[in-house]
Amino acid sequence: MIKGRLLAWDPKTNKRAFAIEHPGPWNGGILSTAGNLIFQGNIAGEFVAYRADNGEKLWSMDSQAGVVSGPVSYSVDGEQYISVTVGWGTAFGLIAAQKNPLSRVLSFKLGGTENLPAATLPTLNIPAPAPSTASQEQIELGHKIYHQNCFMCHGDSAKSGGLVSDLRASSHRDSMALWNNVVREGAMAMLGMPNFSDILTIEKTEAVRQYVIERARAAQPTSASSPTTN
């Protein structure tokens, strides 16, 4: 897996002062303060304070969702606060299939005593998908086309990150009857789903449909789906 890193550079010596390894890419922006502190959130859902001179980890908290923005410092009636937005913004939250779409603003001050409520993760119900007689070749073509045109919003392998509809949950017979109307005729363009008629032929659209059905079949508890490309 791709890792991330916070790198501190000493301009006087023109050498690395320290480096902090992160569990993955796409971590939050950095705030440094006059009190020799660095604040940064990370993709694992942790908001952290480090020593600015050596990178020592001093404090952290579970933010319950990824922190990919930069924190700010401000003063109210002479008291300093640190605030940061928490949630899966940017393209990474769409692609990486993170399952907690929680978003909020967290604010901190010295002596604060409040705690976050327990996180409640949404439950995705994937109904039994429509029957499929697709060949393995057609499903593999759909896999290819999906990852060329669809995955950046609907998630890798048709697993949504929670910010956009999970297509596997729309793979039952009644919803799939509207597939062409949505994908090629722009029935949901006002909601941000573009018209792909200039890119996808009816045959290619059907291949993507069959791939999504197969992904929904694979997600069933007693799935009898045939092996497919992941």
Image: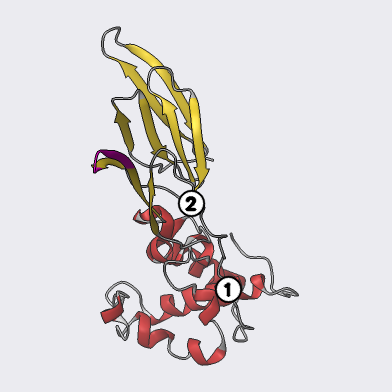
Q: Quadrant of the C terminus?
A: bottom right
The residue identified by callout 2 is 114
Q: Residues within 10 Å of mark 2 (few under 14, many from 20)?
A: few
Is residue 22 in the magenta section?
no
Circle 1: residue type? Leu
Task: Tell me: residue 80, above or below residue 142.
Answer: above
Question: From the viewer's perspective, is 1 left or right of 41?
Answer: right
The residue identified by callout 1 is 124
Q: Secondary structure at mark 2?
A: loop
Residue 184's spot in the image, x, y percent?
33, 82
Of callouts 1 and 2, which one flags the residue occurring earlier in the amino acid sequence? 2
Circle 2: residue type? Glu
In the image, farthest residue toward the front: 77
Residue 33 found in image quarter: top left
Q: Nearer the viewer, mark 1 or mark 2?
A: 2
Q: How far, Cα to Cα, is label 1 from label 2?
A: 30 Å
Q: Which mark is residue 201?
A: none
Is residue 77 in the magenta section?
yes
In the rendered structure, which segment of residues is drawn in magenta?
Answer: 76-81
Question: From the viewer's perspective, is 95 left or right of 69?
Answer: right
Task: Please name the colour scheme applied to the rendered image.
Answer: secondary structure
